[in-house]
Image (spheres, helix red, strand yellow):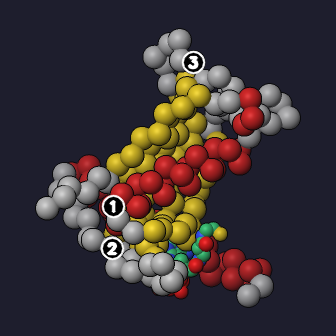
Amino acid sequence: MEKREREVTLRFLAEPSDINFLGKVFGGAVMKWIDLAGYTCAVGWSQQYCVTVYVGGIRFYEPILIGHLVEVRAKLIYTGRTSMHIAVDVQAGDPRSSQFTKTTHCIIVFVAVNEAGETVEVPAWKPESEEDIALQRYALRLMELRKNIETEMNPFIGR
Ligand SMILES: CC(C)(COP(=O)(O)OP(=O)(O)OC[C@H]1O[C@@H](n2cnc3c(N)ncnc32)[C@H](O)[C@@H]1OP(=O)(O)O)[C@@H](O)C(=O)NCCC(=O)NCCS
């Protein structure tokens, strides 16, 4: 049986087109990279089209500079029936050195869909190592916490 990849790393240079008004990388560019890396990971695992259903807890710890090498790592840490929870870490640094700084971490959730846009089941991922069991627990805890956040937000969503 074909092996499914649960991890993807994108590496590229931050380009002048990614710039904000202060001359550093625009937060929206980083969010796009997170979505692209997460999408690639989700599609690789499910072998289906996928859509983003949730992005949580994005915090930009450090700015990314134009010309710096950016590494976006996406790793599947939990599968539900149709959803895949993916931890994404972004780090960046001067390509002349081997020093990278963690700039962002977040969880992004994708749902697998068919060509009609209907949700479809995904293959279950089962953690085996201690590290993966801890990551799965982390995803489950965040899912619980999100329920409270969504309850707080519901009156303001307007739908
Ligand atoms: C994704 C979509 C098809 C899901 O439809 P839905 O009717 O909500 O489907 P369900 O209620 O069955 O939920 C599907 C999965 O999403 C998960 N999900 C829904 N809301 C979630 C949230 N806030 N956080 C995490 N997961 C969530 C559900 O838990 C479920 O996962 P599971 O099957 O593993 O248990 C629909 O919400 C959609 O089309 N959204 C827009 C997606 C999109 O276009 N994204 C790009 C940005 S515009």
Q: Residue at x 63, y 50 (%)?
A: 31
User: Type of residue at label 1?
Assistant: Trp
Density class for disc 1 (Cα within 10 Å; few <14, some 14-19, many ≥20) is many
Crowding at dot 3, Cα within 10 Å, few <14 / some 14-19 / many 20+, comes out as some
The secondary structure type at the circle numbered 2 is loop
Q: Choose between 71 and 141: the one closer to the eye.
A: 71
Q: Is mark 3 within 8 Å of ligand 1?
A: no
- Of the residues shown, which amino acid type is indicated by label 2? Val
Rendering coords of residue 108 (x, y %): 51, 60
Q: Which mark is residue 94?
A: 3
Which residue is most to the front? 115
Where is residue 117 drawn, in percent x and y?
52, 81
The residue at the point 47 percent across, 39 percent down is 10
Decide if residue 98 is in sight here.
yes
Q: Secondary structure at mark 1?
A: helix
Characterize the local packing of mark 2: few (<14), some (14-19) or many (20 or more) Cα atoms within 10 angstroms.
many
How far across and down, in percent of the image, does residue 68 sit? 61, 24
- Label 3 or label 1, whichever comes before in sequence order: 1
Establish whether ligand 1 lies closer than 8 Å to the Cβ of label 2. Answer: yes
What residue sits right under mark 1 in the picture? 45
Mark 3, secondary structure of its residue: loop
The answer to which quarter of the image holds residue 22 is: top right
Task: Write down the residue under mark 2.
Answer: 122
What amino acid is at disc 3?
Asp
Q: CA distance from mark 1 to mark 2?
A: 8 Å
Mark in the foreground, 3 or 2: 2
> Image quadrant for the C terminus?
bottom right
Badge 3 or badge 2: first in the primary sequence: 3
Q: Are discs 1 and 2 less than 8 Å apart at CB? A: yes
Front residue of 60/148: it is: 60
